[in-house]
Image: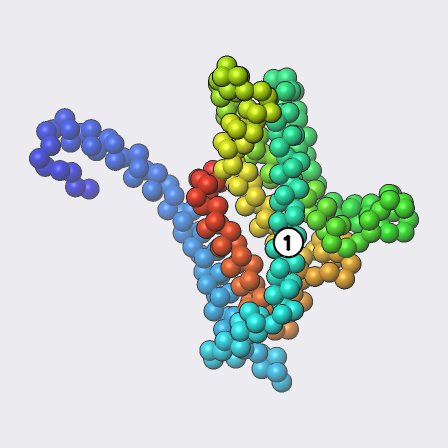
Amino acid sequence: MSVDTTLTPGRRVQALLHRRPALRLTGLLTPALVWLGLFYLVPLALLLATAFFDTNSFTGRITYGFSAKNVVDVLTTPAYLLTAARTVGAAAGVTALCVLLALPLATYMALVARERSRPILLALVLTPLWASYLVKVYAWRILLAPEGGLLGGASPGYGWFAVVLTLTYLWLPYMVLPVYAGISSMRGSYLEAAADLGARPWQAFRSVVMPMLAPAIAAGSVFTFSLSIGDYITVQLVGGTKQMLGNLVYANFSTDLPFAAAVALLPLLVMAAYLITIRRTGALSRL
């Protein structure tokens, strides 16, 4: 490691001490970066490459010659684009509902609840994450059953509303936690300053809290949006005849892997566009 020789000995020592924590951190992150490259980036690259292969219609085996047929079909066929739009709409609806539910809940936990009650409330928010994914979805399937369900005649039945409602329940903790952390970080000084300047509680929340919570909400939306856009089990159990992109991938990966990989490009493109859009909010630095 080179140090500027024009510096005095004392300045050289300070420069070395200043660089050492960064070098140590880089050394600690190296195994994680290698793990990320081997088990995430490499499979993702293989998935992208598979989308440009084809499947022999007679043997069902993959032919490794370059072919853009599957990708072109997915990007130009109205049925697939409609499924993509339906999937994005469901993910956006789930994210919006999670925000509407998380804001009052996190605000109560951070600003209204007693100091001793906050760990208990936080544990209650996290408790559903300990239950099995399938158990929770089947519980909502029983609850929303159009005939003989626990809601009886008030049940909306299976369909798009049931999918959004179930996914909102599944991913709500991932929105509550960053919003709660964001409100906790500004508790006291900002709100007191707004009150001293004559702002009413709702005005302070709208003009001070919400702009500062935007990165936290965006960070939570990364989880709710991405988890919803890739889900396929919930749609199978409570979606009725509706389909999402995950269902198309699941239905084709065992019989036509290149086509399934081409379909998987759509949620990847959507998530890439979504991450680029919220990058300016500073949310990615909070993940």
Q: Can residue 283 be seen in this view?
A: yes
Residue at x 53% of width, y 63% of height: 265
The image's colouring method is rainbow
Observer-nearest of 173 and 112: 112
Which residue is most to the bottom? 58
Q: Position of residue 201 (x, y in %)?
A: 59, 21
Q: Where is residue 41 in the image (x, y as percent from the top left)?
A: 45, 57
Task: Name above or below for residue 274 compared with residue 260.
Answer: above
Q: Is residue 119 visible?
A: no
Task: Name above or below for residue 88 compared with residue 51.
Answer: above
How many numbered discs? 1
Residue 27 quadrant:
top left
User: In the picture, which quadrant includes the N terminus?
Assistant: top left
Residue at x 82% of width, y 45% of height: 143
Which residue is most to the top? 196
Residue at x 46% of width, y 51% of height: 276
Given the image, on which type of amino acid does mark 1 rest? Gly
Residue at x 50% of width, y 14% of height: 196
Q: Position of residue 134 (x, y in %)?
A: 72, 49
Residue 204 quadrant:
top right
Which residue is labeled 1 in the image?
Answer: 89
Say left or right for 51 vs 77. Answer: left
Decide: few, some or many residues near mark 1? Use Cα within 10 Å; few <14, some 14-19, many ≥20.
some
